[in-house]
Amino acid sequence: MPFIRIIPPGSPEAATGPLKTIYDGGKARAGEVAQIIQLMSLDPHLLGASMQMYLSMMKRPNALPGAQREMLAVVVSNINDCFY
C-alpha cells in the first residue's frame, strides 16, 4: 500500500488558514474529516476547488433528491471499480 503524507485533522499544522476551514466544514457535515479530504491536505488550494465542485454537485438543491444523487455516485463508483 502506498504512503501519502497528509496533515492530520487537529494537528498544529492544520490549525490555521484554509485547511482548518475545510477540515472544520468536513467535521460539521459528517462528524469527521474524510480520508479523501486528508489526501489533498498538502495543497489546500486544490482541496478547496475539489470541495467546491463536490458541494455544487451533491449538496445544492436541484432536480434530484440527495439520496438519488448519492445512489448514482455509488453506481458510477461501482462501474468504475472504485471503492470510494
Image (tube, helix red, strand yellow):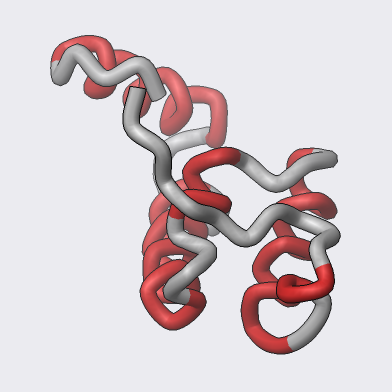
Q: Is residue 45 left or right of residue 8?
A: left
Q: Nearer the viewer, residue 42 or 76?
A: 42
* Vertical side of 21 occupied by 79: above or below: above
Residue 18 lies, in percent from the top left, at 64, 83
Quadrant of the rendering where the N terminus is positioned: top left
Residue drawn 55% across and 35% down? 66
Residue 31 lies, in percent from the top left, at 84, 40
Residue drawn 56% across and 39% down? 35
Residue drawn 53% across and 64% down? 41
The answer to whether residue 61 shows anywhere in this view is no
Residue drawn 48% across and 43% down? 36
* Vertical side of 23 occupied by 74: above or below: above
Q: Quadrant of residue 23?
A: bottom right
Residue 40 lies, in percent from the top left, at 44, 59
Hey, which residue is sitting farthest left in the picture? 80
Quadrant of the rendering where the C terminus is positioned: top left
The answer to whether residue 11 shows anywhere in this view is yes
Q: Nearer the viewer, residue 14 or 30?
A: 14
Say how many tags the image has: 0
Q: Nearer the viewer, residue 11 or 74?
A: 11
Q: Nearer the viewer, residue 17 or 73?
A: 17
Q: Is residue 62 left or right of residue 22?
A: left
Q: Is residue 17 left or right of residue 70?
A: right
